[in-house]
Image (cartoon, rainbow, N blue to C red):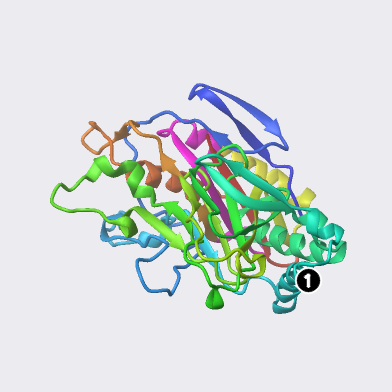
Amino acid sequence: MRLNAVWLLACLSASQYLIKDGGRLGVRNGARGGAILRRFRSGLRPRPPVGRALNDEGPPLIPKHSEDDDYEDDSGSVYDDVVSERQHLHVTDSFLEKTLASQLRSIFDDRFSDPYKAHPDRFAWDYWHVPEQYTLIRTPASQYFPPEVFKRLEESLASYAQEVLGCRSVSPIWLSYYVDGCFQEMHADVPHGPWAFVLSLTDWENREFIGGETRIMRPHMLEMWRDFDDARGLELHDIMDHVPAEFNRLTAFDPRLPHGVRRVSGTQDPKKSRIVLHGWFTEPSPFCVGALTEEEATPALNEATERAIEELSVLPPATGTLCVRIQVEADGHVEALDWLSDTVVPRPGAKVPALDGQCVEPPEDARFLILEAIWKTFAEAQFPESSGQTNITIPFIFQ
């Protein structure tokens, strides 16, 4: 169920903002003084974010908490799971039902089973070539697969987008294959949506090519001068995440980060190529599931959102997407908050107030202030009584 919550439209200064109904929450925030992190004793049980690293050999694909991420509450105890962990990459293996994944792959293989047959489906492909940037063969997935099969695919992606990322729509889906010489050079898809995705139909275990991994620049490379170590060198695995296109693996990532596809070498056969479905998750929007109806939940959600807007509008500027899910009990209090997805990054040069009144520039401090404001606001929210539990998912877009 989608809620018509009150959202803040992105503005050009901290003192000017516009409230819109049915839009999205964009925050362009300024600075405030005297704020410190502390644990709120509201009964709210914070939980860590959804996500995991791959089990492949090599460096982890999803950053982990460091000791520097911990902070102390008023009593001096460490309480770091209140803080969301920034994640630019979500990887899900065995994403589709096994039968659906196999059916999609079988349809592709059947179309190429006899190279001597001139079936109309064989002529549906666009050879997309932009010199020194993109070379691949693609077609709209909605036109390639039978309607009932495509509907199941689209519903699976839409469900994931809503449940995990807080997005209620999926862009038109492309089906592409990469034979020898195909690649995507590094680029960023900023306007398309807050999350890009790649769903692989590649027979990765039996591949007869090299290359084909999705490459994503690690976020710390865009801030490397903040903590540059002139005694430590960098190699490729320090700079890029490489995600193998294993069969039925969904990779969702922050498309603002430079990314691409490693050049494929070794096969000219479409059936033995890198085969992927790809697009973007779009239109972040709140929704609820459970005992409360949309009409019952909206007033309290609007009130909490307005308080969050007031807090966020005076904080250091940031960019990215943060999606939270609150668990509302039958008596209306908020029992728990889950950090679902988080790509929020403080804007470079933002000044953060320190305890001594001076302004400093540690980016994680700005993140903590933002997370604290959201957590506090929804910890104190009170919803109407109902017959049972309700989960409300709320995406925040910082612009």
Judged left or right of residue 278, residue 39 is: left
Q: Image point 40% across, 33% down: which residue?
A: 316
Q: Which range is magenta?
A: 308-336
Q: Position of residue 173 (x, y in %)?
A: 71, 53
Name the foreground residue: 112 vs 259. Answer: 112
Locate residue 257, reporting x and y percent: 46, 45
Name the side, left or right, on which 3 lies relative to 376. right
Residue 13 sits above or below residue 129 on the image: above
The reply, left or right, for residue 270 in relation to residue 79 is right
- Residue 330 is inside the magenta segment: yes
Q: Is residue 386 visible?
A: no
Image position, residue 340 (x, y; %): 54, 58
Of helix, strand and loop, which one carries label 1?
loop
Kindly identify the residue that appears in the image at 55 percent across and 25 percent down: 11
Residue labelled with disc 1? 114
**Closer-to-camera residue (211/104):** 211
> Left or right: where does residue 122 sit relative to residue 9?
right
**Residue extending furthest left?**
231
